[in-house]
């Protein structure tokens, strides 16, 4: 089955362009679009896409509001935030809400397609233009005391959390730790459950907020 996508952006030409790019991929199908945050939430509930491309700045209700509604509803749809700005509070806000990725609108077409694939499978946080330095800078603004994660996680799970925070995929982590990819998946799943986190994106924020990176 192809990965299904909804595109939320207030510019009709942008929606059409993204749809054309994604529909050209054999494994991706665009189900529909939305011109603002309110319509985006309604369409996600109706169509249940695997991924929603969510522009940050939209009329009536913006993408951050819509992303929060989608994530808090418990729907399985992954949110990939789109914006023309990379160094601002949108990055931190989007990740804190539970968005699974962050991509600039001027990213090359192949990066957009890859972003959808990666976010759909929940493999890794994808933010090609948002550097590790930026994440550190933004999350430090709301730094919290170091958590007792060390008391909750096993040493191996802490190690996996650290590599996830570096944006590495399961395959890359497996190679670095000399274990199977399935073992990494198990560790990631256990780590998220123990910490009460929704996905890898929230794990990245958690690691930086709590001084684990």
Image (cartoon, helix red, strand yellow):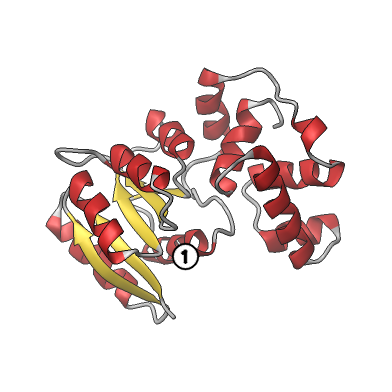
- Confirm whether residue 186 shows in the render: yes
The location of residue 80, given as percent across then percent down, is: 40, 52
- Confirm whether residue 88 shows in the render: no
**10 Å crowding of disc 1: few (<14), some (14-19), many (20+):** few
Q: Nearer the viewer, residue 169 or 111?
A: 169
The location of residue 135, given as percent across then percent down, is: 54, 33
The location of residue 115, given as percent across then percent down, is: 46, 60
For disc 1, the marked residue is: 114
Query: In the rendered image, which quarter contains the N terminus?
Result: bottom left
Q: Is residue 16 above or below residue 162?
A: below
Residue displayed at 52% across by 62% down: 118
Residue displayed at 54% across by 40% down: 131
Q: Quadrant of residue 14?
A: bottom left
Residue displayed at 46% across by 32% down: 92
Q: Seen in the image, is 211 located left or right of residue 22?
A: right
Q: Quadrant of residue 197?
A: top right
Q: Is residue 127 above or below residue 196?
A: below
Residue displayed at 20% across by 42% down: 58
Query: In the rendered image, which quarter contains the C terminus?
Result: top right
């Amino acid at each position: 089955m192809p990965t299904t996508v909804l595109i939320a952006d207030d510019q009709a030409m942008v929606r059409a362009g993204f749809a054309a790019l994604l529909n050209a991929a054999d494994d991706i199908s665009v189900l529909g679009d939305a011109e603002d945050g309110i319509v985006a939430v309604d369409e996600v509930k109706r169509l249940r896409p695997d991924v929603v491309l969510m522009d940050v700045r939209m009329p009536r209700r913006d993408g951050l509001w819509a992303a929060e509604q989608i994530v808090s509803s418990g729907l399985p749809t992954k949110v990939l935030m789109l914006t023309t700005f990379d160094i601002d509070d949108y990055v931190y806000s989007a990740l804190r809400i539970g968005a699974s990725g962050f991509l600039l609108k001027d990213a090359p077409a192949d990066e957009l397609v890859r972003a959808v694939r990666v976010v759909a499978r929940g493999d890794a946080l994808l933010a090609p233009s948002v550097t590790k330095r930026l994440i550190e800078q933004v999350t430090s603004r709301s730094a919290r005391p170091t958590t007792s994660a060390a008391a909750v996680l096993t040493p191996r799970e802490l190690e996996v959390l650290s590599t996830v925070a570096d944006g590495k995929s399961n395959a890359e982590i497996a190679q670095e730790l000399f274990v199977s990819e399935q073992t990494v998946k198990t560790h990631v799943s256990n780590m998220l459950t123990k910490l009460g986190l929704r996905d890898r994106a929230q794990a990245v924020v958690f690691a930086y907020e709590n001084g684990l990176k």
